[in-house]
Structures are given as C-alpha cells and as structure tokens.
Image: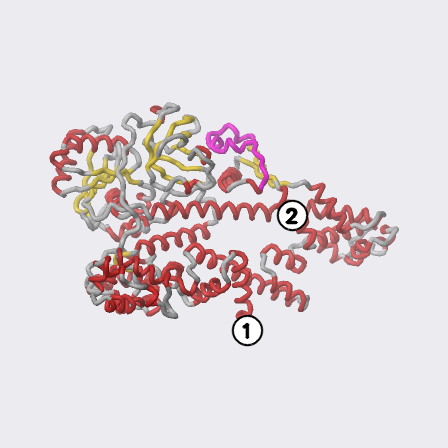
Amino acid sequence: MKDNSVLKNTKEKPQGASFISRSLSLPLQSVSAVLTLLDEGCTIPFISRYRKERTGNLDEVQITDISELNERLEELGRRKETVVKTIREQGKLTAALEKQIRACMDAAELEDIYLPYKPKRRTRAQIARGQGLEPLAALLLLQREQHPGECAGRFVKGDIKDAGTALAGASDIIAEIVSENQQARNTVRAAYRREAVITSKVVKKMQDTDEAQKFSDYFDFSEPLRRCNSHRLLAMRRGEAQGILRVSITIDGEECIRKLTRQFVRGHGACQTLVSQAVEDSFRRLINPSIENEFAALSKERADEEAIKVFAENLRQLLLSPPLGQKRVLALDPGFANGCKIACLDGQGNLLHHEVIYPHPPRNQVRQAAEALQRIIRTYKIEAIAIGNGTASRESETFISNILQNSANNFGNILKYVVSEDGASIYSASPAAREEFPDEDVTTRGAISIGRRLTDPLAELVKIDPKSIGVGQYQHDVDQSKLKRSLDQTVMSCVNQVGVNLNTASRHLLAYVSGLGPALAGNIVDYRREHGPFTSRTQLRKVKRLGETAYQQCAGFLRIDNAENPLDNSAVHPESYPIVGQMARDQGCTIKELIASSGLRRNIRLDRYVTDRIGLPSLKDILGELEKPGRDPRGAVEAFEFDKNVHTPGDLTVGMELPGIVTNITDFGAFVDIGVHQDGLVHISRLADRFVADPTQVVRLHQHVRVRVVEVDMRRKRIGLSMKNIKQ
C-alpha cells in the first residue's frame, strides 16, 4: 500500500508542475526546479537570490506565485483523496470516475463531480426516495408516459396517500437530479460569469443613522459583478455585516430556466410538463441559491486577494522606508492633557533618558517645556527629532520649530521629522516591549518606538502585527489566514532584501531572516549574549540547533561589521567565497583590495568563472556586491513640513494647494496627510493628468506630494484632494 502511494505522488508531481507552468506561463523546467528547491526546505528569498541558475533567473514574485499555486493544488489533492475515499466507501467508485476525479484541476468542477455522492442532510428528494418513489421519477424523466397520473397510482401506499403526492415526491427527486447535473450547473454558472449583477440597498431603519452615512454611496447601488472592484465589494459586504445594507447577486433567471428546460425536456405532453416544472423548481430552490453563494464566495475571494495585494505592497513600501541611521534622537510622543512624552536614544537606539513636558493646553507650561527641551538637546547631544503624528502633532511641531529656529546658533542643524504612530500603542503594551523595557511604562515604550522608527523603520516595525500599522483597507474584512501569510511573506522579503546586522539585530528581526524563525533567532541572541559579538559567519554553526540547512539559508542575509573576512559584511553567500578568492588571486590582490579598487574589478572577466553550478546571473550579483558591499537599498530619509497656516479641517478652502505625505495607498486612490488630523483622499482619477490604472505607479508610501483641496465634507468627515496639474 505504501509503495502505491509513493508511486501515485511521483505521478502527480509532474502533472502539478505542468499545470503550474501553463497557468503562470513559465518554463516547465524552471517550475520543476522551484518545486524541488521548496521540497528541500529552501526559502523563497534564498531561491530567488542564490539559485538563479536552477530556476532560470525567476524573480521573487514568480517564485511566490509558483509556491502559492502549488499549495492550492496540494489542497485540491487532499480534497480529491477525501472524495475518492467517500465514494469508494459507498461502493460506487468506478475506474472511469476515479480517473475523472484524479484529472480534475478545478475545485468547483471537483465539487460538481462529487455532488451526487456527497452525504446530504435529509432533503425532500431523499424523503421521496425513502418512500420508494425513485422508479416513478425515472419513468417521468423518460417522458414516454401519456398518463403519468395512472403510473403514479401504482406507488400509492404508506405515507403516499394519492397520485398527486406521488408525483410531487417524484418531482422533488427530478429537481435534485437536475441540480446535481454538471452541465446544468455549468449553464447557470456561465450565466453568472457573463451577466451577474451585484446590488445593495439600505436597510430603511438604518438609513438616517450616523454609522450608515459612510455607506451612503451604496444605499441604492447596482453594477455588473465582473466590474465591481475590490474596495466597493468589501465596502458593501462590511455594510451588510453591520446590518446597514442588503446585498444580492442576480441573473436573468427566466433565460436560465429556458436553457435548462431545453436540456431536460423533450417534446410536449403531461410528463414533459411535470419535468419542466421540476426543472424550474430545481433552478429556483436548489441550483440558483447554490451558484449565487458560489459567486458571492468567489467575488469575495477575488476582492480579498486584491485588498491583500494592496496591503502587502503598502507594507513593503513602509518597511523599506529610508532609515535615518545611527543618530542620537529625541523622540516626542505628543499629547495635550497628559503632556508630551520625550525619550532620548543613542545611535544604537538605546534609551538614555525620558521625561514629560506640558507645552500645550490645559497646562500651558510653555516656558518650562522650552527650557527642558533645550536642556535635553544639549545634554544628550541630540542630532534629530522624531515627532509622532497623532494628537497634538502639529502643535508640537510648531513648538519645536520655534525653539530650533531661536536656538539655531546653539544647536546647529537639527532636523525634525514627523513619524507615523500607527501601532506604537500596540507595541508598547506587547510582550516584546515588556521584554525590551521591563522597567518602563507604556508611554515611554511608545516614545522609544517612535524614535526607532525614524532611525530604522524596518527593525522596529517587525515587532508589530502588520495589521496594526495602518497601511491597508478592510484588513479586518478579508480572509485573516491569507492576510497573515501574505504579510509575513512581505516582511520576510523586506528583511532579507535589506540584510540584517548579526550583532545588533533583535530576535524579532532575526526571526524573519531566511531559514531561522523565532527559536533559532532566540538561540542566536543567547549565543551573542554568552560569547560576545560574532566575528565571522562560520560561528553561526556553533549556535544551538542551527544546522547546515539553516546555515545555508540564512548566512547570505546576515552581516558582520568589521569582520576579518570583508565578505561577511556583504550579500555574497559563503558558498561563493572560493570564487571571489579566485578572482582576487587572478588579479594578484587580496579580497579587501579587490573590493576597494574599481580598476581591479573592471579587469575581471566573469565568463572565466562560469561552472556547472554557477552562471553569469549569480556572478553579476557577486560583482555588484563587491562594488558596494553591505549597501542599504532603502535610500535616504527626507525632512518635511506642513503648511504653517493650516491646522484643522476648518482651515481648508477649495482650491488651496498644500504639501502632504502619502499615508496609505488603495486600489481607488491615495490618502494624504496634510496636517489637519484627518487624511484627505486623492481619488485614482485625480492622481495624475493621465489615466492611472494602478495608484502605485504614481505614488509611493510616505512620498512627499503637493495636492489641491477639491472638497471638504464636514458631516461625512471627508476631504477630497487632487494632484492634477500640480508639479510634483
């Protein structure tokens, strides 16, 4: 039995690879290589960076697509096993039916095949079968009887009191047979695919409530389902979940009934009339509700996928935001009644000092706050200031600007930055924050997080659940397991793209490095604490439970400053060190000299180092890394200032042109912070002077933009903005 199972799996693997190759339009050889590498325990970042020759130079997105489609096929395979087992136990499995099931590559088609054999709750048709009416249904379906009532009379017994009852029961059986017919279901499915309309109506008793106003666009809304984009569908489904909207998906039912009738009814007569009525009943009571639910689920799944895709891209941009780097930072978490919490950090992000100042109402201790701020800047040699963007942010920014302007000669050029607070409160109360700062309260931890987000956003934000970072739409409405998987993959991709300092990274950051995870990350931190800083990548082999596979997957993504081997501070994988060594020897120099001299590197002929294991793509990556070893791909952070004359929505007028920061990107536009404690929306139609299909083609997260106010709706708390005809 075990041998047969192994043989079956080896047969299905190539079938899956071929299907993936066709579906994604990728070479079969590349797909097969990726599936093999994934089976060997390789991670997507490792495969895309260090196995280009085996995959045909596929990028991370393509490899991710292969992995996800393969997992769906594996899930389909498990479902096939359940279906085959169930039908076999019923004694109804034929060789032809099993072959049909095994060959099926579509989940909906598989369920259609399974439907006649699927264990059911007690249906009207099952009750009729229990009453012995199945032979009568078969007779009626043949449509040869001229007097079906007389035939039905032969079945009057027990609970069947008369011919009418017998015919009704037989019609129920026919209706179920029709509903389980693959061709019939595909007829209705095709109609839904072609012409389904989604409609939403407001629940009358909710229409005038404040919570309903955000859904006012959908109080009387209708459009073809195939044109309904992600954010509109998710908005309607949220309104439905909150009891504000009623949502339905409909087709032309009469046309479907005519098509089904032509399929099952032959000729005219009493039998044909009964079968025709059963077909209509089947459509209205069984097929249509089932297919409507199927398309509601499919449309929700597609909307989820689009929303998750947008969320993941926003998260990627946020995590790859430029870091300020190792600067001494004063972080300020602004507030009114509770004051502004200050935390001072050294160049490594360690806490030096914290206190609270009260420069705003109701205390208005402006002079004392100014003196305290000046003292702190001098004492801790502050180089930059990070201001949270929450309550009292604009007021705090103005307060600090005045101090810096009046003390420019004393402090030099101290730059200030507005930093997103989203998720800071979540972090400050989390186990990670308690572990890092067990003796500090949540306000101090929150301020520290704001400061660290400026110096290294990636290292800080990995400690927070991505859903709490505030860069998605409808993140609580989409499939949570798919969302978590996508966001975890995004975080891992970003962490490995940037690389991680092995001697300074927290275990939270290390956990996302290829091949590690929380347990090994903790072991690395423990080893570092016991033995001191790592001096070479090979020391990783001494870390508890970090075996050869984990070492292979993680080593290239970990960096060691001032290591004896300069390649340990680069993205060159240890398995390629011998090649770099040979390059250096061929140039008559050391590796360090090769890295330092562009002239020596220009003399390298890469084709001389091609082997059956490593080709030109990887060799070009190695040469690029030698040019700028350990370079950070995130760029440089930019300072920003809001318009000094605008602080609240009441200060806005239509036509006003203002600076802003992109805080969120959706498939329908971009949200921009213009400094009034409420983001405005630049609709996709107003993002540029040309047609825009994808907002991410025009704007990126945290981009500094100029916008024009086109609408201020105080009741709905909406600010409409435009970027058209504005030079960016």
Tally of marks: 2
- Residue that carries the numbered disc 2 in the rendered image: 190
Quarter in which the C terminus is drawn:
top left
Decide: few, some or many residues near mark 2? Use Cα within 10 Å; few <14, some 14-19, many ≥20.
few
Badges 2 and 1: C-beta atoms under 8 Å apart? no
Per the rendered image, the range of residues in magenta is 204-225
Quarter in which the N terminus is drawn:
bottom right
Tell me, yes or no, if residue 517 can be seen here. no
Residue situated in front as seen by the camera: 134 or 689: 689
| Residue 308: x %, y % from top left | 45, 47
The numbered mark, 2 or 1, whose residue comes first in the sequence reads 1
Residue situated in front as seen by the camera: 606 or 393: 606
Q: Is residue 512 magenta?
A: no
Q: In the picture, residue 385 is in which quadrant? A: top left
Task: State the mark number for residue 7.
Answer: 1
Q: CA–CA distance between discs 2 and 1?
A: 37 Å
Decide: few, some or many residues near mark 1? Use Cα within 10 Å; few <14, some 14-19, many ≥20.
few
